């Protein structure tokens, strides 16, 4: 979110109720800031499943296929050695490295996907300029509506947020 309006709510029940009311009124570009994990928040915001499991699967598969292919290239194709009469391409010795590289690449993919999904590469966000937003790390809950939302109307939105129990309503990201 680059611009929008946010409201400070006293507890998680008020936050979920405010999100429900906003979604019923047609607002879709919402975000929430909470001091701890709130059950059913992702469902209330209309978010789907986390992409981390997909990242783990793709990363693990790429690591395993890459490790097996590299071992085959080096041991069976480029530098074949006859050891004990076994064929150059014997899959069993390749198995341990293949599994380990699958785990390693899967873990690295989850790490990078987490940083991207949590937007931790971004060092500053316009939401940080809201006076009192630091309360979201201690004891308050904030809901923000993006100014790019199709239904965005500043006056109506301020009224809705106050109606749902927002103690403070503030704009961020410049003039709306």
Image (cartoon, rainbow, N blue to C red):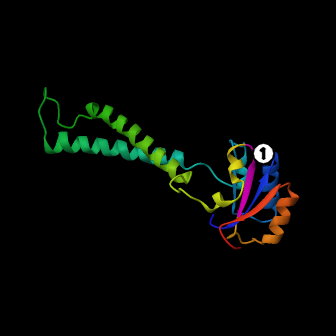
Q: Which residue is painted at 69% across and 69% down in the image?
A: 147
Number of numbered tags placed on the structure image = 1
Q: Is residue 162 left or right of residue 95?
A: right
Q: Secondary structure at mark 1?
A: helix
The residue at which mark 1 appears reads as 12
Q: Which residue is painted at 39% across and 43% down in the image?
A: 105
In this rendered view, identify the residue nearer to me: 16 or 57. 16
In this rendered view, identify the residue nearer to me: 94 or 51. 51
Q: Is residue 13 left or right of residue 3?
A: right
In this rendered view, identify the residue nearer to me: 66 or 17. 17
Vertical arrangement, residue 31 with respect to residue 37, above or below:
below
x, y percent for residue 26:
78, 66
Residue extending farthest to the right is 163
Quadrant location, the C terminus = bottom right
x, y percent for residue 68:
29, 41
Q: Is residue 38 left or right of residue 50?
A: right
Please provide the residue range marked out in magenta: 139-145
Q: Which residue is painted at 88% across and 59% down in the image?
A: 163
The secondary structure that dominates the magenta segment is: strand
Q: Which residue is painted at 53% across and 56% down in the image?
A: 123
x, y percent for residue 141:
74, 49
Q: Is residue 172 left or right of residue 121?
A: right
In this rendered view, identify the residue nearer to me: 1 or 81. 1
Vertical arrangement, residue 144 with respect to residue 70, above or below:
below
Circle 1 packing at 10 Å, graded few (<14), some (14-19), many (20+), is many
x, y percent for residue 45:
71, 54
Q: Is residue 140 magenta?
A: yes
Residue extending farthest to the front is 131
- Residue 6, quarter of picture: bottom right
């Amino acid at each position: 979110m680059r611009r929008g309006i946010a409201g400070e709510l006293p507890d998680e029940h008020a936050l979920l109720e405010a999100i429900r009311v906003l979604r019923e009124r047609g607002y879709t570009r919402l975000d929430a800031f909470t001091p701890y994990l709130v059950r059913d928040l992702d469902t209330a915001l209309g978010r789907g499943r986390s992409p981390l499991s997909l990242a783990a699967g793709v990363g693990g598969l790429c690591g395993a296929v890459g490790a097996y292919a590299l071992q085959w290239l080096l041991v069976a194709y480029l530098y074949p050695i006859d050891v004990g009469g076994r064929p150059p391409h014997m899959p069993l010795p390749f198995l341990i490295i293949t599994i380990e590289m699958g785990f390693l690449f899967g873990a690295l993919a989850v790490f990078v996907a987490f940083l991207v999904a949590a937007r931790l590469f971004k060092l500053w966000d316009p939401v940080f300029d809201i006076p009192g937003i630091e309360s979201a790390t201690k004891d308050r809950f904030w809901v923000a509506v993006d100014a790019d939302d199709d239904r965005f109307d500043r006056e109506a939105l301020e009224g809705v947020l106050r109606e749902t129990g927002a103690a403070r309503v503030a704009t961020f990201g410049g003039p709306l």
